[in-house]
Amino acid sequence: MTSEEIYTKLQPIIAAYLPEDVSAENIKKDADLTQELNINSAHLVDVVLDVEDAFDIELSNNDLESLRTVNDAIAIIANKVEN
């Protein structure tokens, strides 16, 4: 699975948890999930659970600690999908 395919599949997952004042168009690869996209910590957990289901992977606590941007998510998912 390419990073572009992961990004395409990841966008609607993230979009489901955006606050009303943030457009899905803001889901750029370099966007910070909590700072720029305003996803709160509770919704970030929901994003992680949805990602695990959608990609059939399991994220560790270390993965979660390094999850800051959309690009981080893509890299973590790509690594998990390959293994």
Image: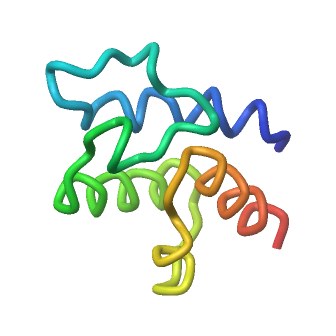
Residue visible at 63% across and 35% down in the picture = 29
| 24 lies above or below 75 | above
Residue visible at 68% across and 39% down in the picture = 6
Give x and y (percent) for residue 56.
Answer: 57, 60
Residue visible at 26% across and 45% down in the picture = 39
Residue extending farthest bottom: 61
| 14 lies above or below 12 | below
**Quadrant in which the C terminus appears:** bottom right
Residue visible at 48% across and 78% down in the picture = 65
Give x and y (percent) for residue 67.
Answer: 51, 64
| 22 lies above or below 76 | above
Left or right: 81 in relation to 33: right
**Quadrant in which the N terminus appears:** top right
| 42 lies above or below 43 | below
Instruction: Tell me which corner region of the image, top left, top right, bottom left or bottom right, holds residue 22.
Output: top left
Give x and y (percent) for residue 42.
Answer: 17, 60
Of residue 33 and residue 4, the one placed in the foreground of this image is 33
Instruction: Tell me which corner region of the image, top left, top right, bottom left or bottom right, holds residue 9.
Output: top right
Residue extending farthest front: 35
The image's colour scheme reads rainbow
Of residue 53 and residue 72, the one placed in the foreground of this image is 72
Figure label count: 0
Left or right: 71 in relation to 22: right
